[in-house]
Amino acid sequence: MVEQFRNDDDRDGENVGNSESDNHKGENPNHTQEVKVGKPVILKAEAYKTIILYASRYANQAIPSENWKEIYGLLIGYRDDDFLYVERAIPMTVGHDTD
């Protein structure tokens, strides 16, 4: 996943401590830069099924959207150099209405 962001902690229009932006001083103090965030996720079918079944109990087309609820749970798995693997999903609780 790639995320665009603007550094609001800039001083004098420069990104402090960012060598990439040091090459472009004075060009545009409000520039955006591309940063790689996280790793691709591999979700096992059983974990996906658990998430969908639990979530659809509290938010689906048969329930008016103003009555939908947040759900919370745990994802159990592991990571390697390239991917994040989710082996299991454990539903825990239901929260408040969604916005």
Image: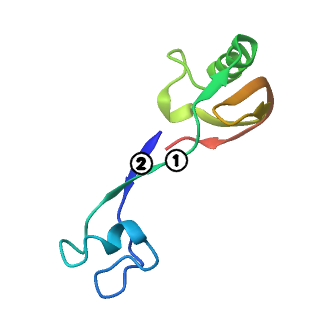
Q: Left or right of 62: which side holds 15?
A: left
Residue positioned most to the left: 27
> At 68% from the left edge and 37% from the top edge, which residue is drawn?
81
Give the residue at mark 1.
Answer: 37
Give the residue at mark 2.
Answer: 3
> At 48% from the left edge and 29% from the top edge, which residue is drawn?
65
Distance from the alpha carbon under mark 1 to that under mark 2: 7 Å
Q: Amino acid at mark 2?
A: Glu
Q: Earlier in the sequence, mark 1 or mark 2?
A: 2
**Secondary structure under badge 2?**
strand
Q: Amino acid at mark 1?
A: Val
Q: What coloring was used for the rendering?
A: rainbow
Q: Mark yes or no: residue 58 visible.
A: no
> At 28% from the left edge and 81% from the top edge, which residue is drawn?
13
Q: Left or right of 95: which side holds 22?
A: left
Asked whether the residues under the numbered discs 1 and 2 touch, taking CB atoms below 8 Å apart as contact, a structural biologist would say yes
10 to 97, vertically: above or below: below
The image shows residue 19 at horizontal and vertical percentages of 41, 71
Residue positioned most to the bottom: 12
Q: Mark yes or no: residue 44 visible.
A: yes
Place residue 40 in its image quadrant: top right
> At 65% from the left edge and 31% from the top edge, which residue is drawn?
83
User: How many numbered marks have been drawn onto this rendered protein structure?
Assistant: 2
28 to 99, vertically: above or below: below
User: How many C-alpha atoms fall within 10 Å of the one at disc 2: few (<14), some, or many (≥20)?
Assistant: few
User: How many C-alpha atoms fall within 10 Å of the one at disc 1: few (<14), some, or many (≥20)?
Assistant: few
The image shows residue 30 at horizontal and vertical percentages of 25, 70
29 to 4, vertically: above or below: below
The answer to which of 66 and 36 lies nearer the viewer is 36
The answer to which of 26 and 78 lies nearer the viewer is 26
The image shows residue 93 at horizontal and vertical percentages of 78, 37
